[in-house]
Amino acid sequence: MDSLSDHTSRRSTRGRGSDRGSGGPTAAINRFLLLAGALLFINGISVTLIAALIPFAISSAIVVTFVTFLTAASALAYIAKRNPARTLALVETARPLVEILTDRDRARRQGGL
């Protein structure tokens, strides 16, 4: 005679899963929903961390920009002090480009293009 315990033990040792419905469309939907929920949870945590760190990132960017500007300005000042004639020649060479750019900007500032 088959008892209930024999029947359940035979069912669970088949190797394909414990239930007939496992692996069906419902299980696939459940797996998808669990994965989507996990991704949304991780995304929410990362957005929260980024939002908390934005002020630090902005202040760091300002500091990096300021330090880079100071470094470039000090390097240019050092080069200008070492060889003033060459620096003056470079400035005179760049003067037409600066005039072209400022003329174009002047028309825009005065209400032109």
Image (cartoon, rainbow, N blue to C red):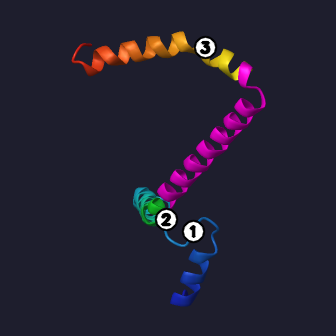
CA gap, disc 1 and disc 3: 84 Å
SS class, disc 3: helix
Going by the numbered disc 1, the residue's amino acid type is: Gly
Q: Does label 1 or label 3 sit earlier along the sequence? A: 1
Answer whether labels 1 and 2 touch (C-beta < 8 Å).
Answer: yes
Going by the numbered disc 2, the residue's amino acid type is: Ser
Going by the numbered disc 3, the residue's amino acid type is: Glu
* Chief secondary structure of the magenta portion: helix
CA gap, disc 1 and disc 2: 7 Å
Does residue 24 sit above or below 112 in this rendering?
Answer: below
Residue at image coords 55%, 86%: 2
Q: Mark 3 points at which residue?
A: 92
Does residue 66 sit above or below 75 in this rendering?
Answer: below
Q: Mark 1 points at which residue?
A: 17
Give the image quarter of residue 60: bottom right
Q: What stretch is highlighted in magenta?
A: 56-85
